[in-house]
Amino acid sequence: MHNSHVVLIIADDAAFPRDVLGRWQTERIVPTFTIMSTELFHGAGLGNFDVAIIGPIRSGRLASILKTLDKGPHPVICVLETAGQMHTIRPEYPRLLLVQKHEGWLDSLLTVASECLKRVELGVRARKAEQIAAMNSRNAALGQYMLDNRHGFNNLLTSVLGNSELLLMDSANLSEAARDQVETIHNMALHMHEIMQRFSSIAVEMQVAEKQSQDETLELSQRIAAAN
């Protein structure tokens, strides 16, 4: 977990965020905090945080706060005074994480919030991994297409090179402009040929490296099996 996470604290009791921040400051990693009262919270900035913590709220305002936050994808932790409040709120908001105030409640709150932030980070990593996997899949498909068609492409290049060389051998019958154009075609074809040669070399190098890795893995497995 890293300190770029943002924790939103909503409370009408100034002591609540002070206590939470004071306890969190004792940890090795401290997130960024956004603190606001119910008067300032109207769903504004919804989504610009990773975890929301709801503390003591003025009478009659808790329901609207929960309704607004429950629409978002982020974990929401609500700190309540009594078990009765928990029994009342849990059926209506099953996604809500409830913490009852008791001796050591700050430690419990911090444990729950830290786990939520870890899950948020894992979710971010999973999405990035999916994006990388999709990109690698596209690149692999492109690379496979080039492998499948490289021989045909090389044959076409050979034809272009051969014909351009024949024209250059008879360049005396060409105008200066035509000769320049044929030379350009010939040079570009040579450059494309060099690229394809490098591509083929890379393909061979990757095959050799893959076989070497497989051989090393097999050898290690055989050693482990022999040792057991």
Image: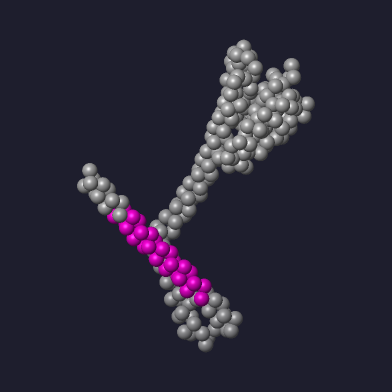
Closer to us: 134 or 184: 134
Residue 209 counted in the magenta span: yes
Q: Residue at x 62, y 34 (%)?
A: 24
Q: Residue at x 60, y 81 (%)?
A: 177
Q: Quadrant of the N terminus?
A: top right
In the rendered image, residue 175, in percent from the top left (x then y), is placed at: 58, 84
Closer to us: 27 or 156: 27
Give the vertical position of 139 relative to 164 (above or below). above
Q: How is the image coloured?
A: one colour
Is there any visible trace of residue 116 in the rendered image? no
Q: Residue at x 74, y 19 (%)?
A: 58
Give the vertical position of 6 relative to 109 (above or below). below
Query: Which region is colored magenta?
Result: 187-215
Is there any visible trace of residue 130 in the rendered image? yes
Overall secondary structure of the magenta section: helix
In the rendered image, residue 82, in percent from the top left (x then y), is placed at: 63, 14
Q: Quadrant of the C terminus?
A: top left
Which residue sits furthest right? 39
Give the vertical position of 189 relative to 42 (above or below). below
In the rendered image, residue 117, in percent from the top left (x then y), is placed at: 57, 35
Give the vertical position of 39 relative to 26 (above or below). above
Left or right of 74: which side holds 38? right
Q: Residue at x 48, y 69 (%)?
A: 192
